[in-house]
Amino acid sequence: MISIDVFVVLYRRKIAESETVQSLLLATTACTQLQLRVHLWDNSPEADAQAVILAPDWRYSWNGHNAPLSVAYNAMLLHAASPYVLVFDQDSRFEPDFLDALCAAMRAVPADMYVPRIAHQGRVISPCRLRWIKGAPLPGVTPGTLLPRCFTAMMSGLCISQRFLWSLGPAPFDERLRFYGIDTRLCRELNLRGGRAYVHRGTLDHDSALRDRRDPEHYVQRKIWLMRSWRHVFDRNRLERLSVHLYIAWTVLRLVSGPGRRRGARSILAEVYR
């Protein structure tokens, strides 16, 4: 039997309301090949009273101060006992056979990272090719293949080797990153070290906030958080750092010239570099 520690961070959502928790409960009932230890980290202002009825192999921690995801992951990692950790967002939806697919991949091919396909509105958005800062489609990658070194992937659903994580240092998830960029930084580190990432046949349905433009103000705020992350994800040398600053400036100009935008470039840049 394969043992995995599962990390889920909650924010303003009860345990019973989390799509990920509901999917996990169904999947663990159906899958008998995996032993899961689930770690729930709650960033909500108030603790969830229903946590007391969780099963013994479900660990609940309430923070209440909306700690950065990287900090939460590192804290949960200290309590992880399995060779691999499986990270989910709170709102990921998957079928019970997701864990079977992961288990089959882990038995078949040794890898540092096992990657699912993530779909948003019916289109696969992860994994993808990292074309410098932006992600681009990755043609030819199908389940049952190793990813090329130029790949990146969204964090939700990633199954990562503890051995690889601890090779990055005492805080494997970069704590300069609050929300965005943690996954890209991790994939870049794996690529740099020549690690192996394997695509299994499991899929996730996930609502991508960065692709939601219905509220222009919220969209701009999410882009600000994303631009902040670029400064810490792409910082290997002076040329890369300079290029990031130029790309941020270009992105801000595009933001302020879009329809319905109310903020000026100076205001956005001040928040990015705060």
Image (cartoon, grey):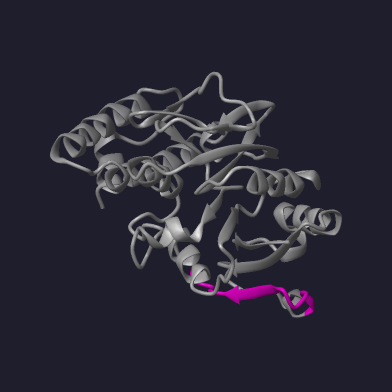
Identify the image quadrant of residue 190: top left
Residue 243, above or below 20: above
Q: Tell me residue 229's x, y (percent).
A: 35, 46
Kindly identify the residue that appears in the image at 42 percent across and 50 percent down: 182
Asked if residue 266 lies left or right of residue 109, the reply is left
- Image height of 19 relative to 218, above or below: below
Q: In which quarter of the image is residue 264?
A: top left
- Residue pushed farthest right? 30
Tally of numbered tags: 0
Q: Left or right of 192: which side holds 112?
A: right
Say which of 88 and 111 sits in front: 111
Instruction: State the residue at coordinates (56%, 70%).
Output: 80
Q: What stretch is highlighted in magenta?
A: 53-65
93 or 107: which is nearer to us? 107
Residue 266 inside the magenta-drawn segment: no
Q: Which of 264 and 127 is in front in this view?
A: 127
Residue depicted at 67% across the width and 50% down the height? 91
**Residue 258 horizontal/vertical position (percent):** 41, 23
Q: Position of residue 16 (x, y in %)?
A: 77, 63
State which quadrant residue 236 falls in. Answer: top left
Give the residue drawn at x 24%, y 31%.
Answer: 249
Q: Does the magenta stretch include residue 56?
A: yes
Q: Is residue 156 above or below residue 128?
A: below
Say whether residue 230 is left or right of residue 213.
Answer: left
